[in-house]
Image (cartoon, rainbow, N blue to C red):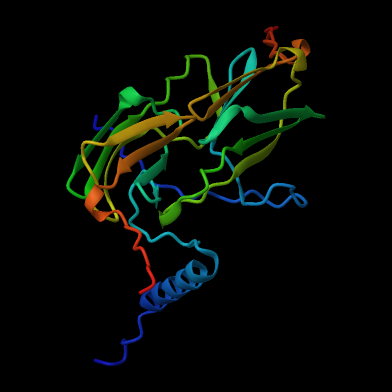
């Protein structure tokens, strides 16, 4: 019968999740419930006057395991997290860390200069610094009295 | 065999243990703990933590590891935030007696490897089963 099942509990939950996220985002600036469907690695993007910064937590990943490319307004992060094999005579109590590959596209908030991109891996945090092209940098407007 | 694709994990907050001096959230680092005949080895992911930011304490078989992250530089406006940044803290009740003087810790690329050698008398003794 049409109309009998118009209430979808999952949609209600999804709406609640979105509203909660919005509430948190507006008051605290962060969301407690990441949208499902996120891709590894999770990134934080920030910017200042001249640069855009993309950061990702990649513990144990070395520069040689990373492959970063940039095209237009997208960054492609590919790589592998390797965990060295334990020796023979070893028994596990806990196993929470994972190894594997990742391949993710990060959409940048605005245009960048593809020739001025640098990436640093420090203490397991990858920081990619991208320079904003000159044309789009906010320009100070001088106010003069007539 | 195809390589496994990594899935993003949301950081879990460490249970509150009294108020801290530094502001911000505290998370549980993901750990692998395994045992060799001679020692317990603990490997913890603490990205953003440098060697100097790590603190390890072992008292009465309670092992505490904590890491202080270097905060991101000020002056940047956040545009997208998919993960939270904060210090790490975790406690473990060890079932083995550890020789505290021979504990080794290495912090590299955000991964802490802690080798806890078992105290002499805690090493497993093979029990001879005699028939008769």
Q: Is residue A126 left or right of residue B5?
A: right
Q: Residue at x 76, y 52 (%)?
A: B19
- Count of numbered circles on the image: 0
Q: Foreground: B71 or A67?
A: B71
Q: Is residue A83 left or right of residue A6?
A: right
Q: Residue at x 51, y 30 (%)?
A: B110
Q: Foreground: B73 or B69?
A: B73
Q: Foreground: B71 or B108?
A: B71
Q: Is residue A17 left or right of residue B58?
A: left
Regarding residue A94, the answer to whether it shows in the image is no
Q: Residue furthest left?
A: A72
Q: Is residue A10 depicted above or below B105 in this figure? A: below
Regarding residue B132, the answer to whether it shows in the image is yes
Q: Residue furthest front?
A: A146
Q: Position of residue A16 (x, y in %)?
A: 45, 76
Location of residue B99 by image quarter: top right
Q: Foreground: A39 or B91?
A: A39
Q: Is residue B18 depicted above or below A4 in this figure? A: above
Q: Position of residue A43 (x, y in %)?
A: 39, 47
Q: Residue at x 70, y 7 (%)?
A: B132
Q: Residue at x 69, y 47 (%)?
A: B22
């Amino acid at each position: 019968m049409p109309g009998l099942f118009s209430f979808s509990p999952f949609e209600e939950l999804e709406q609640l999740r979105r509203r909660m996220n919005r509430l948190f985002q507006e008051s605290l600036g962060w969301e407690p419930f990441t949208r499902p469907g996120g891709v590894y690695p999770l990134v934080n993007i920030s910017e200042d006057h001249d640069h855009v910064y993309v950061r990702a937590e990649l513990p144990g990943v070395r520069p040689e395991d990373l492959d970063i490319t940039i095209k237009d307004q997208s960054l492609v992060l590919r790589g592998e997290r390797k965990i060295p094999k334990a020796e023979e005579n070893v028994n596990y109590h806990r196993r929470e860390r994972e190894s594997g590959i990742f391949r993710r596209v990060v959409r940048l908030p605005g245009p960048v200069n593809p020739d001025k991109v640098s990436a640093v891996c420090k203490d397991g945090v990858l920081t990619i610094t991208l320079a904003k092209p000159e044309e789009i940098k906010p320009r100070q407007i001088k106010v003069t009295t007539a | 065999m195809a390589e496994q694709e990594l899935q993003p994990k949301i950081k879990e907050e460490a249970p509150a243990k009294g108020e801290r001096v530094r502001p911000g959230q505290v998370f549980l680092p993901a750990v692998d703990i395994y045992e060799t005949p001679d020692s317990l080895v603990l490997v913890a992911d603490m990205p953003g933590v440098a060697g100097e930011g790590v603190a390890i304490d072992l008292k009465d078989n309670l092992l505490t590891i904590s890491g202080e992250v270097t905060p991101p530089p000020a002056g940047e406006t956040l545009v997208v935030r998919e993960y939270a940044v904060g210090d790490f803290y975790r406690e473990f009740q060890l079932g083995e007696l550890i020789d505290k003087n021979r504990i080794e810790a290495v912090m590299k690329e955000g991964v802490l490897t802690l080798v806890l050698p078992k105290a002499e008398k805690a090493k497993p003794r093979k029990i001879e089963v005699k028939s008769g």
